[in-house]
Image (cartoon, grey):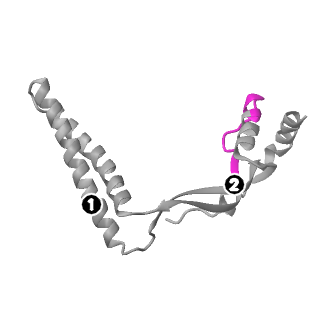
Amino acid sequence: MPAPSIDAITRNYQPVETYRSYAEAQRAVDHLSDNGFPVGGTLIMGVDLRTIERVLGRQTYLRAAGKGAVAGAWFGLLIGLFYAIFTPRLLYPLISLVLTGLIWGAIAGAIFGLISHALSRGERDFVSTSTIAAERYEVLVETSQVGRAHELLAGLRG
């Protein structure tokens, strides 16, 4: 089933105010709520979205192995804890199970990180983070409530 279109979602809504940041739009909805406005169904819509990708550095074999080792260590720790919970033994063997899982997980993760980096053959040879940002945020309310919302938000501005 396809996702509903923006027009279908906003059909019975009208924008009340536009804000430069999400925090300002959130503060406006909070103000409406504090003043008894029925905020159920109120929309905060980001408009003019942009994807921003910040390149952090080059992806090297060492970095790939390190990231893989960290991910593998967490998985190995989880497996080690799982075995330790269900193994009726003294404390020392339980600790060794957890540490063994952590170490073998780190080794396997590092190997997997190296292999996956080698298989990429230099494509996307960098590390980055991505975020989505909006140019502005509109607060939309049901058409029948627009007048009351305008009155309440005028108090926020004033």
The answer, for residue 105, to whether it is visible in the render is yes
Quickly name the residue at label 1. 112
Inspect the magenta stretch and tell me whether residue 43 lies in it.
yes
Task: Quadrant for the C terminus, please.
Answer: top right
The answer, for residue 82, to whether it is visible in the render is no
Using residue 123 as the reference point, say whether residue 4 is left or right of it.
right
Q: 135 and 70: which one is in front?
A: 70
Mark positioned earlier in the residue sequence (2 or 1): 2
Q: 101 and 139: which one is in front?
A: 101
Residue 79: give x, y in percent of width and height.
21, 42
Inspect the magenta stretch and tell me whether residue 112 lies in it.
no
Q: Amino acid at mark 2?
A: Gly
Residue 135: give x, y in percent of width and height.
74, 57
Q: Is residue 57 above or below residue 24?
A: below
Say which element carries label 1: helix
How crowded pointer 2 is (Cα within 10 Å; few <14, some 14-19, many 20+) is rated as many
How crowded pointer 1 is (Cα within 10 Å; few <14, some 14-19, many 20+) is rated as some
Q: Is residue 127 above or below residue 96?
A: below
Query: From which residue to which does the magenta span run?
Result: 31-45
Residue 34: give x, y in percent of width and height.
74, 28
At 33% across and 48% down in the image, what residue appears? 70
At 29% across and 63% down in the image, what residue appears? 114
Residue extending farthest left: 89
Q: 16 and 38: which one is in front?
A: 16
Comparing marks 2 and 1, which lies closer to the viewer?
1
Quickly name the residue at label 2. 46
At 78% across and 29% down in the image, what residue appears? 35
Using residue 131 as the reference point, say whether residue 11 is left or right of it.
right
Residue 49: give x, y in percent of width and height.
67, 61
Say which element carries label 2: strand
